[in-house]
Image (spheres, rainbow, N blue to C red):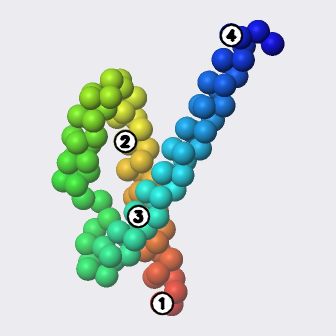
Amino acid sequence: MNLRLEEIEKLRMDMIKVTKEILELAAKRCRIAGKIGELKRKTGLRIVDKEVEKRLIEECLMKCEDLGLRREFCEKLLKLLIDEAVRVQEARMDEVDSRRL
C-alpha cells in the first residue's frame, strides 16, 4: 500500500474513533436530560423551556463560530440534540407516571 493510501486509512480510523466519542457524549447528554426531566416532574416544571433553549443555542452558535463550523450545520445539530433531550424527558415522565398506576 502506498503512503497516501496508508495516510487515508489512518485518518479514516481517527474519524471512526472521534465519531464514537461524539456518540458517547450524546449518550451522556441524554442521561443528563433524563435527570433534568425527573427534577422537572418533581418541581412541576414544563419540559420545554424556550428561554433555556435560546440561551443554549446562542452560546453554542458562538462556540461553533469560534471553531470555524458552519452555522447551518450547528443549527441542525443543536435542533437534533434539543429534540432528543425533550423526547428523553417526556419518556422519563411517562415512565414515572406509569409506575404510579
Residue carrying label 4: 4
Disc number at residue 78? 2
Q: Disc 4 versus disc 1: distance between alpha carbons?
A: 61 Å
Disc number at residue 32? 3
The disc, 1 or 2, on the residue closer to the chain's N-terminal end is 2
Q: Quadrant of residue 74?
A: top left
- Nearer mark to the viewer, of 2 and 4: 4
Residue type indicated by callout 1: Arg
In the image, residue 32 above or below residue 17: below
Residue 58 horizontal/vertical position (percent): 21, 40
Residue 39 horizontal/vertical position (percent): 32, 76
In the image, residue 67 above or below residue 28: above
Residue type indicated by callout 2: Leu
Q: Disc 4 versus disc 3: distance between alpha carbons?
A: 42 Å
**Label 3: element kind:** helix
Does the image show residue 81? yes
Residue drawn at x 45%, y 82% as measured from the top left: 97
| Side of 91 relative to 37 (left or right) | right
- Nearer mark to the viewer, of 1 and 2: 2
Residue carrying label 1: 100
The disc, 4 or 1, on the residue closer to the chain's N-terminal end is 4
**Label 4: element kind:** helix
Please say if the residues under marks 2 and 4 sit with CB atoms less than 8 Å apart.
Answer: no
Residue drawn at x 59%, y 31% as measured from the top left: 15
The disc, 2 or 4, on the residue closer to the chain's N-terminal end is 4
| Side of 71 relative to 8 (left or right) | left
- Nearer mark to the viewer, of 2 and 3: 3
| Side of 28 relative to 70 (left or right) | right
**Label 2: element kind:** helix
Residue type indicated by callout 3: Ile
Does the image show residue 90? no
